Amino acid sequence: MPALNPIGRTLSNGLRVIVSRDTTVPVAAVCLWYRVGSCDEPAGRTGLSHLFEHLMFQGSTHVPANGHTAAVEEAGGLTNASSGFERTTFYTVVPAGQLELVLWLEADRMGGMLDAFTPEGLGNQRDVVLNERRERYDNVPYGTGWEQLVAMTFPPGHPFRELPAGSPRDLAAVTEDDCRAFFRRHYAPDRAILTVVGDVEPDAVVDLAERHFRHIAPSASGRWAPPACSRTPALPAETRRHAEAAVPGPAFMAAYQLPARGGRAYAATDLALTLLGGMSSSGLHDRLVRRDQLAHSARFSLLPLRSAPSLGRLDVRAVPGTGLDVVEKVVDEEIERLVDHGVADASLRGAKAQIRREWYDRLAHPGSRADELCAQEAHFGDAALADAHLGEALDISAAEVRQAAADWLAPERRSVLTYEPAGATDPARAARGAAA
């Protein structure tokens, strides 16, 4: 994979502009990363950042509602957005000759979204966001499991305790004044990073950014800073919850508090999770799915966070009739096996090959490259670190992986949620539900 070699400039209003030239693709991929996410929402207004992801497509000073998307598509491109705990991202890919159109559109809504803001637009997009929540969380089996685990992991009042989806009650309470204040505080050039990847001239991109963004004033509240929270809110003991619901079978889920994104401990923990449940040859898949046939699936994945502990997400969907105590025993045994016996060289090579493949898959698309450059700049202050990321991950030793498993995958660092189908009558299941 060729080096990204990003070139960075900062405009007078604080907007950080990053350019990575790639003449092999005749496109321009644009990522505009606002350093605002669910961790920045006021108390009682969860879901506001996700709501704004939608409101930002409802017009601006010179663009009608939904006109942003229409203009990009008419130019032969595509555009979308996403929101998370720590960021809201707008990304667009167009033929390289249409780059200026994209920058004009992004500048128009950064500087003038409130000019087109209406009560009708707020009501419509609130309904869209609430419907997305129903489709993704409330009306699907196990849908609120991850939401419950995150709330169990972080203490009340912690800025990472609520998912970006927000609560229906809080979304219903959002007012026009809430929206105006949130936009003015967070959607400003000194709280944003603009990256462009593709067949472009870096100096020309910076000139275009100056032309279209320089008139936008920085935020009155000053530069972005991480939310006030503890990076490692220690759990005194494992927390647990049991639920009976309309689900097709039993499930064992857990969230582990892990190192914040960045550094060797984080990379070693990522490899430990890959060895345990990130591949078809992983220990948990081998034991639970292939050999013992106790589960349909068993996966361990990583949610990277920078301003709070990252989260290891364990999800085991057991075969109906399987005791979840048996599943938990296997999970603990596999973690203990890694801690007690370490990792074989062949297994470590396989896990590193998986990490390498995932990284190359991510960078294969210019839009994903633009997003990664934004992330490196936002989290570490240097987009060029993207070129060193893979090498650092592959340099981790077997001893570091073993130590990471011992330090970060202990029961006292996790929250556990178990599911049983509603109406389970087995005495052992009933006893577990009563204990929870």
Image (cartoon, rainbow, N blue to C red):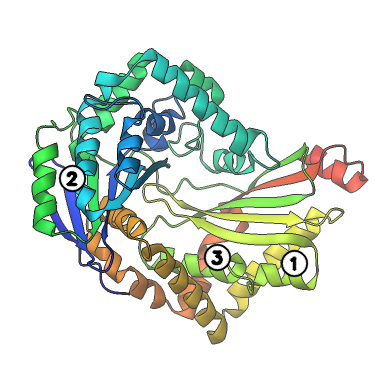
Query: Which of 365 and 222 lies nearest the eye of the viewer?
Result: 365
Nearer to us in this view, 14 or 159:
14
Q: Nearer the viewer, mark 3 or mark 1?
A: 1
Q: Is residue 303 among the parts visible in the rendering?
A: yes
Q: Name the residue that disc number 3 marks.
A: 273
Label 1 residue SS: helix
Residue designated by label 2 = 100
Whichever of callouts 3 and 1 sits on the residue coming sooner in the sequence is: 3
Q: Are marks 3 and 2 in contact (CB under 8 Å)?
A: no
Q: Up-down: is 182 above or below 248?
A: above
Sequence-wise, the earlier of marks 3 and 2 is 2
Q: Are marks 3 and 1 in contact (CB under 8 Å)?
A: no
x and y, in percent, of residue 342 in the image: 57, 79
| Disc 3 to disc 2, C-alpha distance | 42 Å
At numbered mark 3, what does the secondary structure look like: helix, strand or loop? helix
Q: Give x and y (percent) for residue 390.
A: 36, 71
Q: Looking at the image, which is closer to me, 233 or 216?
A: 216
Apparent side of residue 338 relative to residue 36 in the rendered image (left or right): right
Image vertical order of residue 255 relative to residue 229, above or below: below
Q: Which residue is mark 1?
A: 289
Q: Earlier in the sequence, mark 1 or mark 2?
A: 2
